[in-house]
Image (tube, grey):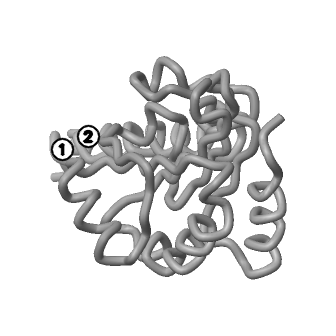
Amino acid sequence: MESTRGPGKSQNLANVATIVVSVLLSVVLVKVFLLPQPSPAPNLAQPRVGMNLGQSLPGIDWAKNKRTLVLALSTQCHFCTESAPFFQRIQKETAKNLKMVAVLPQAVRDGHRYLEGVGVRVDDVRQAQLSEIGVTGTPTLLLVNGKGTVADVWQGKLQPDQEAAVLEVLKKVAP
């Protein structure tokens, strides 16, 4: 005698599970491959010409300095260490018409120790989160005018021709 029963409970459960997984997989595939992806928001924190550092780095007398080169560095950045000879050259060739301020996320004493260890002399060392001055990578150089406004920006370890171009700009006497 044949059974007139339909599929068992386990068969029904397996069918439902297969349908649920298929629907979820379809939703994921449609989302990933067919719907447009939102573009990432532009990073507005990037250092840029025209931004003012007066609020971000209080206590620096921008007007007295006339031109200040802000070195955004980190004691843990090997590109900063590799750039130390260039920073030494900047200090040597522009000392009379340019103040240099190093800004690091590490404590001021650690910043002093690091700069001393790589042979870079600056007029001031400050501790700040680099994102507060718009810096997302080190080293970054910011040339700041007497009003605290960024006049030029250079990011990363510079090539020799880029270093020469930076020195040209930095050797100019402030107006």
Residue occupying image coordinates x 22% and y 40%: 13
Crowding near the residue tagged with mark 1, few <14, some 14–19, many ≥20 C-alpha atoms within 10 Å: few
140 versus 3 height, above or below? below
Which residue is nearer to you in this view: 25 or 128?
128
Report which quarter residue 64 is drawn in.
top right
How much space separates mark 2 and mark 1, taking CA atoms?
7 Å
Read off the residue under disc 1: 8
Give residue 117's position: percent from left, percent from top: 29, 76
Drawn side of residue 18 relative to residue 147, left or right:
left
Read off the residue under disc 2: 12
Report which quarter residue 86 is drawn in.
bottom right
Q: Do the residues labelled 2 and 1 touch (CB within 8 Å)?
A: yes
Give the amino acid at mark 2: Asn
Which residue is nearer to you in this view: 27 or 102?
102
Describe the element under mark 1 as helix, strand or loop.
loop
Drawn side of residue 104 relative to residue 175, left or right:
left
